[in-house]
Image (cartoon, helix red, strand yellow):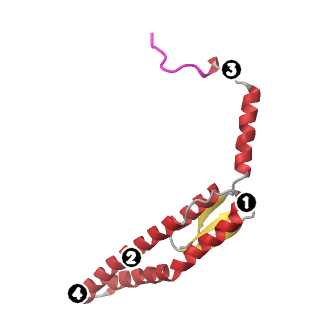
């Protein structure tokens, strides 16, 4: 006869008052937090949207990593701190916005040059510049993500 590896879940009785108090505390915790999610736009940029109002809080974020970091931090931030936190995040994004856009555009130009050129010298130059712009872009994204912190 086979031996049962786990105990039956029916052996423990559920205390209804304890369960209701746990559910109440979970509901209060959810009510004290905002609910934000990240959505990709048709222009290949990202938005962070507030579920309660269905309006975007952040638009035209170039990187998926940055958008997910912002939505995760906003989800963990208490509602009372959101009016202080959102402008801080917008300021951080505005500091690096021009550099991000420049390197995204550079990557597109260099990729197009690599795909269309027949000149070997231009190909090598475009490949090296593509690698450099990609490295700078990754560094910028890491800087922005590290500056977006969870505010409690």
Residue depicted at x 74% and y 60%: 52
Q: Which residues are magenta?
A: 1-9
Q: Are marks 3 and 4 in contact (CB under 8 Å)?
A: no
Count up the numbered dots: 4
Residue 25 in percent (x, y) is at 72, 41
Image quadrant containing the C terminus: bottom right
**Label 3, label 4: how far apart the Cα atoms are:** 76 Å
Instruction: Pick whichever, 114 or 100, lies toward us.
Output: 100
Q: Quadrant location of residue 106?
A: bottom left
Residue depicted at x 62% and y 55%: 76
Disc sitting over residue 80 in the figure: 1
Q: How many C-alpha atoms fall within 10 Å of the one at disc 1: few (<14), some, or many (≥20)?
A: few
Q: Helix or strand or loop: what does disc 1 sit on?
A: helix
Q: Are marks 3 and 1 in contact (CB under 8 Å)?
A: no
Q: Are marks 1 and 4 in contact (CB under 8 Å)?
A: no
Above or below residue 123? Residue 144 is above
Mark 2 or 4: the one toward you: 2
The first of marks 2 and 1 along the sequence is 1
The first of marks 3 and 4 along the sequence is 3
Disc sitting over residue 136 in the figure: 2
């Amino acid at each position: 006869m086979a031996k049962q590896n786990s105990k039956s879940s029916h052996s423990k009785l559920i205390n209804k008052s304890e369960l209701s108090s746990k559910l109440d505390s979970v509901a209060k915790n959810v009510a004290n937090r905002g609910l934000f999610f990240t959505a990709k736009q048709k222009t290949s940029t990202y938005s962070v949207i507030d579920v309660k109002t269905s309006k975007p809080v952040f638009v035209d974020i170039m990187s998926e990593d940055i958008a997910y970091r912002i939505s995760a931090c906003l989800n963990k931030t208490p509602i009372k701190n959101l009016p202080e936190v959102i402008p801080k995040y917008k300021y951080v994004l505005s500091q690096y916005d021009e550099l991000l856009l420049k390197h995204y555009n550079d990557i597109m130009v260099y990729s197009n040059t690599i795909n269309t050129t027949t000149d070997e010298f231009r190909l090598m130059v475009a490949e090296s510049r593509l690698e450099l712009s990609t490295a700078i872009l990754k560094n910028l994204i890491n800087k922005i993500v590290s500056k977006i912190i969870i505010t409690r």
